[in-house]
Image: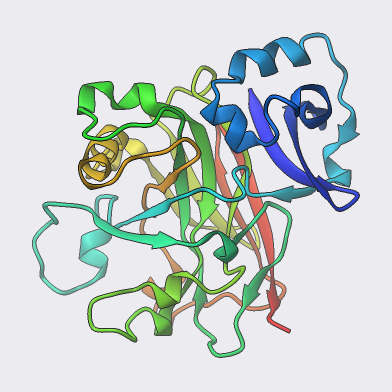
């Protein structure tokens, strides 16, 4: 099942994507599950599946403003340097990492598919990073790797937009350059685990104005999804609706010579064949 959150007539709603339309779940089961995060937390997938059976779409997708599928996750974890060859891109002769690099984003830093991402006023170094995202369904702490898969509700996509010259303002952190308002995106929807097995393999590609810049597969992850869940849950309780952006392949704009930064008018597409396409145009911050 593909589950999306969206605005309709200015009101936040959610539903199941069927073809090019959406079956409105807010109207049908919203009393029990007021939003998609609540549906995930309260194990409402069976209720959603029963509700949409035999239903024609209520709204065309094209008429809706898509939001990030979980608009306010408690935690949006982001993993760095996770695909093979990524460590070599840094050209610092360092050994392969023993543990994943990790930072967090806030919900105001991402928009939904089809919504503009912003190049900030203070920088010309907005970059793209296409990523696969796992969405937590079942809460847990100290989750063993062999049990990790049962904690995944589904998968979505992320353009983990980075403002490169702000990544090194502090001595040890990259938080500033990863949290500019509306600098990245998540979506277009969550594909549930029963229809998109997170064990994979999963492909990932990023295009800018139709040109493929990044392309890889989860078979080349240094830290697979089950490892990430076990690792993160060692120090933090994973909650329903939490998201883990699992790293970007080689080929971000910063790695070209000269760098190829995003500019207003560019269109960034992140695609995985079993999930769909996350698409956003770039605009200048007003």
What's the image's color scheme? rainbow
Name the one closer to the observer, 2 or 130: 2
Confirm whether residue 200 shows in the render: no
Dividing the picture into quadrants, the one containing residue 207 is bottom right
User: Residue shown at 82%/39% (left/top)?
Assistant: 61
User: Residue shown at 53%/45% (left/top)?
Assistant: 157
Figure quadrant of the C terminus = bottom right
User: Residue shown at 51%/17% (left/top)?
Assistant: 194
Residue 85 horizontal/vertical position (percent): 25, 56
User: Residue shown at 84%/46% (left/top)?
Assistant: 64
86 displayed left or right of 104: left
Name the one closer to the observer, 96 or 98: 98
Figure quadrant of the N terminus = top right
Confirm whether residue 42 shows in the render: yes
Q: Is residue 264 above or below residue 187?
A: below
Q: Is residue 26 above or below residue 67?
A: above
Q: Is residue 216 above or below residue 147?
A: below
Q: Is residue 108 above or below residue 50?
A: below
């Amino acid at each position: 099942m593909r589950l999306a959150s969206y605005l309709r007539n200015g009101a936040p709603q959610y539903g199941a994507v069927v073809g090019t339309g959406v079956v409105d779940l807010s109207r049908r089961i919203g009393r029990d599950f007021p939003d998609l995060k609540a549906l995930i937390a309260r194990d409402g997938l069976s209720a959603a599946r029963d509700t949409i059976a035999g239903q024609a779409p209520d709204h065309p997708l094209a008429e809706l403003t898509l939001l990030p599928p979980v608009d306010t996750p408690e935690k949006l974890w982001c993993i760095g340097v996770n695909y093979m060859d990524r460590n070599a891109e840094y050209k610092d002769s360092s050994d392969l990492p023993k543990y994943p690099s990790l930072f967090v984003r806030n919900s105001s830093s991402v928009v939904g598919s089809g919504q503009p991402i912003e190049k900030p006023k203070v920088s010309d170094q907005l970059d793209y990073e296409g990523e696969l995202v796992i969405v937590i369904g079942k809460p847990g702490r100290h989750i063993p790797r062999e049990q990790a898969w049962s904690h995944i509700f589904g998968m979505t996509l992320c353009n983990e937009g980075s403002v490169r010259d702000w990544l090194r303002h502090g001595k040890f952190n990259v938080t500033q350059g990863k949290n500019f308002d509306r600098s990245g995106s998540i979506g277009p929807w969550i594909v549930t685990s029963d229809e998109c097995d997170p064990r994979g393999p999963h492909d990932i590609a990023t295009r800018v104005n139709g040109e493929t810049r990044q392309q890889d597969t989860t078979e080349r992850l240094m830290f697979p999804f089950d490892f990430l869940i076990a690792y993160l849950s060692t120090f933090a309780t994973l909650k329903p609706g939490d998201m883990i952006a699992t790293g970007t392949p080689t080929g971000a704009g910063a790695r070209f010579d000269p760098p190829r930064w995003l500019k207003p008018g560019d269109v960034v597409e992140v695609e995985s064949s079993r999930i769909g396409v996350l698409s956003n145009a770039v605009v200048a911050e007003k």
